[in-house]
Image (tube, rainbow, N blue to C red):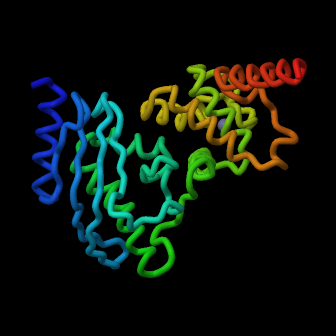
Amino acid sequence: MSNSEALIRRQFAELSETYSELRLCEDAPSRWAIRGILAFSATYHDVTITDAFSILVKLPKDYPNSPPTVQETGGRIPTGFHQYPNRTLCLGAPVEVWRRFKADPRLVTFVNTQVVEYLYGYAYFEKYGEMPFGELSHGAQGIREYYQELFNTEDVQIVLALLKIMADGAYRGHHACSCGSGKILRKCHGPSVLELLKQQPKERFLQDATNVLYSLKESEMKNFDWHLLPKALKKELDEMARERARREKCA
Ligand SMILES: [Zn+2]
């Protein structure tokens, strides 16, 4: 038994103590999944909801370095409700999902907190027609709002400029902060940036910056400073533009 298999089996045993109708399966070598009924009773702000959902939890190959993904398999949650196009549940902004998972990388904690909160949110929505917690919008817009709130700014260009520092691995505490406050990074947005850098690898910040870019409205594109984009993203967009120009020339 490999170390990761032992860890997964141990974590699953712990999960089963609370959720007895879930089963662990190895779908292919090192491809672990958990299937079955997740029955829960949860209370937030004095409202208790007792419910059960059919779920599929997939563990990534590098588990527990990355968090699991979750799908609802009973056909109860409609596609329009906080899901990615591949039907994976959108448990929150990816960086937040990672941050919470990394704080206690165990299946039981992941299910107890992130998965149950999501399912509670859906069951509440079904019953009362509204979301129980302040709602984070879906997908790109949600990621953008997450960072806007975290960096305490309405300005999406500042969000991208700070994401660029993380995606490019270019943190220098004595440089001027990208928000334009005139303060040095260390005395301004630096602490939030350093905290985020601990949560996920820099490729994920590149992905988040791409999502924020896709959330831009047309009116925001007009004065957009393309130099605020992470280097790898700018390079990709430049290549796409060159490719387009080449095709247009040939036609
Ligand atoms: Zn700042």
Give 173 or 64, whichever is nearer the viewer.
64
Q: Where is 16 relative to 208, above or below?
A: below
Residue 61, image x and y in percent?
A: 30, 29
Q: Which residue is at a point 75% across and 33% down the rendered structure image?
A: 182
Q: Quadrant of the C terminus?
A: top right
How many badges with numbers are in the image?
0
Which residue in the rendered view is the most extreme toward the front? 251
Q: Quadrant of residue 100?
A: top left
Q: Which residue is at a point 41% across and 68% down the rendered structure image?
A: 122
- 158 relative position to 101: left or right: right
Residue 250, image x and y in percent?
A: 88, 18
Q: Where is 58 relative to 247, above or below?
A: below
- 126 relative position to 24: left or right: right
Q: Quadrant of residue 230?
A: top right
Q: Where is 106 relative to 233, above or below?
A: below
Residue 79, image x and y in percent?
A: 49, 60
Q: Which residue is at a point 58% across and 30% down the rendered structure image?
A: 206
Q: Which residue is at a point 40% across and 74% down the rendered structure image?
A: 124
